[in-house]
Image: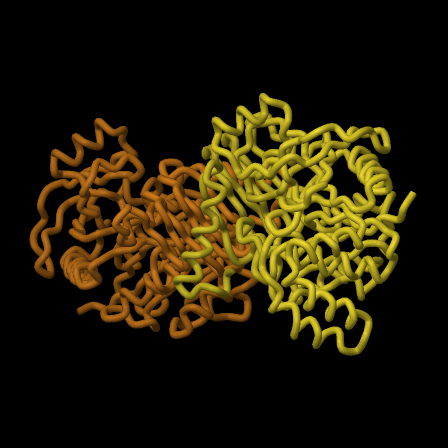
Chain colours: A orange, B yellow
């Protein structure tokens, strides 16, 4: 089988897991409903198919050292720090160039560092199937779609096109269209129709195919990526990143490339997936107690129902309360409603407005 | 005027302010709705009338060092550490002996270290009035009664007897009877009747009178107290405390002495008093914001109503919640209902049951 390279995208700074996540310690570097930091789980999940020396991480410059500590077997040069975030087209475009330098015949598999997928065996089978499909269709780009189990309004959806055939034992389709985050009624229809999947931000491609697609659909990316690919591994690498990366156009790979690619493939992934978007994700990731509470860390729960509890470096004790999110860290405690997990963002903004940045 | 000595009773280990209060750091050593630790507030409040050299603290042996740090002007020998708590009769009985040794003609004023009283001027006027009453009735014991402003069921009440006269500008009465903590209906009747006051655990007496009352009503206390009074100030003091204190009968001054004293006096205190019994006390001590939240420490509150918030060594951020108590400390967070402030005790017991004593 063609060699696979993993491109782990770890640029996010997500404030929605405050106070566990901070500017200097984003969620991908933390265990969230997991034993190990999310990025470690993402890397480890791939190891049976993609050893660490074929993994690459594109992250923010300020997280590079920590990522190298967490993933010591990933070659240091393959942990790349963006001086500024330029969205996924720049990130994947650069990674494609670097994979091409490492092994021009390889296939790159790009995925977020902070999603949770299980079972691992199903994921790996489908990555192998993606490789088989791209062996047969070497100029195509492939997007993975998660088989939906609820009418989710928080994700973009992907419409399945014509069946292309079976590769590696899995059905592969044409990608017919991207569907913007739907309202609930539309999401119900998408779910019922059976022709739509969730966009999990996971892609597979030969680097040459990605380079061509970028040249066609996002030509403004090309000069910067060319310069960066040339500088990689030279003493001028750090300076080149500082010089060229900030000027790359900021656009997602979906809008910038995939939607415009005429022959994109779609591979459905029938597995449990979570984008670990906010604290309410814990309720999907951890088993509840008899009263519906889920907890990570050390906690004491008395007469309380349906709470989500997380403690770092200490303990949470709750009594007689319901439907809350309670998060303890040594210097900050969060309490909000379970149905308002997104509200954490507003709290973090309020902290900044009040000059309390030392807590963010 | 006769010299007054303050006897500040600081033996409590109160778990109801967990997680701020811990076995090694009870509430009297903490600021609770106050800028300074409660015991510092109690001492400072008395200073215009009772200088530090005439203040005495009876506390637990393990808090002696911290009390001496907090009250550096109180002579070290006057901070006495009980090897074990033996309730208020032993505490006040010992203090009376020690005051007698310091100044046989003085008057002792005993009070808890962790109550909050205001305005200070009214308190001091009434302490002076108590001294005047005891100058006129030197063999009597005097109990202060707080003028009630609500039908409180959590306190013992005191029934006013015959008016004795005016001393220091204040009306002084006979103490007619102790009333056990009433139910709500009875408390309403007590409040409406106008003849009852709250028992705040505050007393005044000449040491000789207290010694006589103890000899009459609690003679089992006498041998131990005699031995302790003899040893105070000698190299054998620490050993004497260890030897005699644990064998003193454990009984409150109210049950053991005051209820039985034939000629006890009652001096009403028309001031704001709070026994700072549990977290809900903060709502009586601190001004609320427009949505009814009260907070001490650093906090951010968004769209939340009627919460009680305390943070030590960090921050509490809450959003969209109501009627909660939220307390942050670096290693533990508490969340419970505002109407269940007493429930903290059950949580602390549960921590101990689960072997989580490192948090208690």
Q: Is residue A109 left or right of residue B94?
A: left
Position of residue A256 measured from the top left corner of the image (x, y, whole percent)? 35, 42
Answer whether residue B87 is visible to the viewer in this image: yes
Position of residue A208 measured from the top left corner of the image (x, y, whole percent)? 29, 58
Residue placed most toward the observer, A231 or B96:
B96
Instruction: Determine which quarter of the picture holds residue B98.
Output: bottom right
Residue placed most toward the observer, A44 or A299:
A299
Residue at 25% x, 37% y: name it.
A152
Position of residue A230 measured from the top left corner of the image (x, y, whole percent)? 45, 64
Instruction: Determine which quarter of the picture holds residue A2.
Output: bottom left
- Which residue is farthest top? B192
Number of labels in the image equals 0
Residue at 72% x, 29% y: name it.
B270
Q: Is residue B217 above or below residue A76?
A: above
Residue at 46% x, 40% y: name it.
B340
Answer whether residue B124 is visible to the viewer in this image: no
Residue placed most toward the observer, A16 or B142:
B142
Q: Is residue A142 left or right of residue A345?
A: left
Q: Where's the N terminus of chain B, which quadrant?
A: top right
Residue at 52% x, 34% y: name it.
B153
Q: Is residue A246 left or right of residue A79?
A: right
Q: Is residue A331 left or right of residue A165?
A: right
- Which residue is farthest right? B1
């Amino acid at each position: 089988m063609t060699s696979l390279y993993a491109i782990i995208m770890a640029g996010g700074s997500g404030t929605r897991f405050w106070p566990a996540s901070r500017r200097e310690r984003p969620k991908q570097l933390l265990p969230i409903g997991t034993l190990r930091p999310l990025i470690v789980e993402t890397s480890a999940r791939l190891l049976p198919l993609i050893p660490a020396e074929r993994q690459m991480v594109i992250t923010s410059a300020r997280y590079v050292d920590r990522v190298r500590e967490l993933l010591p077997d990933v070659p240091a040069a393959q942990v790349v720090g963006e001086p500024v975030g330029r969205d996924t087209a720049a990130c994947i475009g650069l990674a494609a160039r670097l994979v091409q330098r490492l092994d021009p015949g390889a296939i790159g598999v790009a995925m977020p560092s902070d999603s949770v997928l299980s079972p691992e065996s199903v994921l790996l089978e489908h990555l192998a199937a993606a490789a088989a499909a791209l062996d047969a269709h070497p100029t195509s780009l492939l997007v993975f779609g998660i088989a939906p189990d609820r009418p989710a309004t928080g994700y973009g959806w992907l419409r399945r096109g014509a069946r292309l055939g079976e590769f590696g034992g899995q059905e592969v389709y044409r990608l017919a269209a991207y569907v913007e985050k739907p309202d609930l009624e539309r999401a119900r229809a998408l779910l019922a129709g059976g022709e739509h999947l969730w966009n999990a931000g996971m892609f597979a491609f030969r680097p040459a195919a990605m380079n061509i697609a970028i040249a066609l659909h996002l030509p403004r990316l090309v000069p910067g990526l060319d310069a960066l690919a040339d500088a990689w591994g030279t003493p001028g690498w750090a300076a080149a990143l500082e010089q060229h990366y900030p000027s790359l156009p900021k656009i997602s790979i979906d809008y910038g490339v995939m939607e415009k690619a005429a022959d994109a493939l779609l591979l459905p992934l029938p597995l449990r997936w979570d984008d670990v978007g906010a604290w309410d994700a814990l309720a999907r990731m951890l088993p509840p107690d008899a009263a519906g509470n889920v907890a990570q860390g050390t906690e004491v729960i008395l007469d309380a129902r349906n709470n989500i509890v997380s403690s770092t470096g200490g303990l949470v004790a709750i009594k007689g309360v319901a439907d809350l999110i309670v998060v303890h860290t040594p210097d900050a405690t969060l309490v909000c409603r379970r149905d308002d997990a997104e509200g954490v963002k507003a709290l973090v903004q309020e902290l900044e407005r009040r000059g309390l940045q030392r807590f963010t």
